[in-house]
């Protein structure tokens, strides 16, 4: 399944094929309409992600040996190698992130429900984290997680539609 869309850098129209066109950028399909509309309205974006359900592990190195017992009792951690003063391990990824990182700092009067606003290197970022486990530490089904992703991508799009055109005052 194709998970990306292509957005023209000049018109911000969502297109179907890049064909090595230097005036386009790749965007996750679920938020391509939102990203295109943000840019059309003058809110220039830098990076974005619609969130993805992926079962994967991050690899970590040289964790202090004092934490070994704690990590050995965690079902989401696999100990890879124990050394004299440290150990290496893999930890299960337990969440995904829907985000829009803007090309500069913007000041929004509101943001989509359930999202948070952060600053990153003088850029505004709005994001929503979706966990793969519920509050009782039970793993959510893929369908449940994908429905959450879809619902929050829709909330993002509805918010973008209501945003006014951006007028620079600086």
Image (spheres, helix red, strand yellow):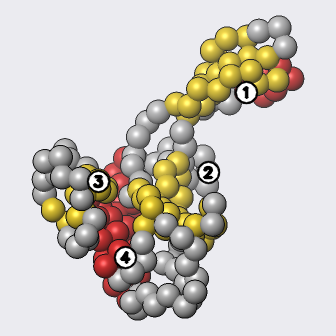
* Residue named by callout 1: 71
* Residue named by callout 4: 38
Say which element carries label 3. strand
Number of marks present in the image shown: 4
Distance from disc 3 to disc 1, alpha carbons, whole Å, reads: 38 Å
| Residue 4 pos. (x, y %) | 25, 52
Distance from disc 2 to disc 1, alpha carbons, whole Å, reads: 19 Å
Whichever of labels 2 and 1 marks the residue nearer the N terminus, that label is: 1
Say which element carries label 2. loop
Distance from disc 2 to disc 3, alpha carbons, whole Å, reads: 37 Å
4 w.r.t. 83: above or below: below
Whichever of labels 1 and 4 marks the residue nearer the N terminus, that label is: 4
**Badge number at residue 136:** 2
Q: Could you tell whether 58 is left or right of 10 in the image?
A: right
* Residue named by callout 3: 26
> Which corner quadrant holds the C terminus?
bottom right
Distance from disc 1 to disc 4, alpha carbons, whole Å, reads: 43 Å
Q: Are marks 3 and 4 in contact (CB under 8 Å)?
A: no
168 w.r.t. 37: above or below: below
Q: Could you tell whether 22 is left or right of 166 in the image?
A: left
Q: Nearer the viewer, residue 39 or 80?
A: 39
Whichever of labels 3 and 1 marks the residue nearer the N terminus, that label is: 3
């Amino acid at each position: 399944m194709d998970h990306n869309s292509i957005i023209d850098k000049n018109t911000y129209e969502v297109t179907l094929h890049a064909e090595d066109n230097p005036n386009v950028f790749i965007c996750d399909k679920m938020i391509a309409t939102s990203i295109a509309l943000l840019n059309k309205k003058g809110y220039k974006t830098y990076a974005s992600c619609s969130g993805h359900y992926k079962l994967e592990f991050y690899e970590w190195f040289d964790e202090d040996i004092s934490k070994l017992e704690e990590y050995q009792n965690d079902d989401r951690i696999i100990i890879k190698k124990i050394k004299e003063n440290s150990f290496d391990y893999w930890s299960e990824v337990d969440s995904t992130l829907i985000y829009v990182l803007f090309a500069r700092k913007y000041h929004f009067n509101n943001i989509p429900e359930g999202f948070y606003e952060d600053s990153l290197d003088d850029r505004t970022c709005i994001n929503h984290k979706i966990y793969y486990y519920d509050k009782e530490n039970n793993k959510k089904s893929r369908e449940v997680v994908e429905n959450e992703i879809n619902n929050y991508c829709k909330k993002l799009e509805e918010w973008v539609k209501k945003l006014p055109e951006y007028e620079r005052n600086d």
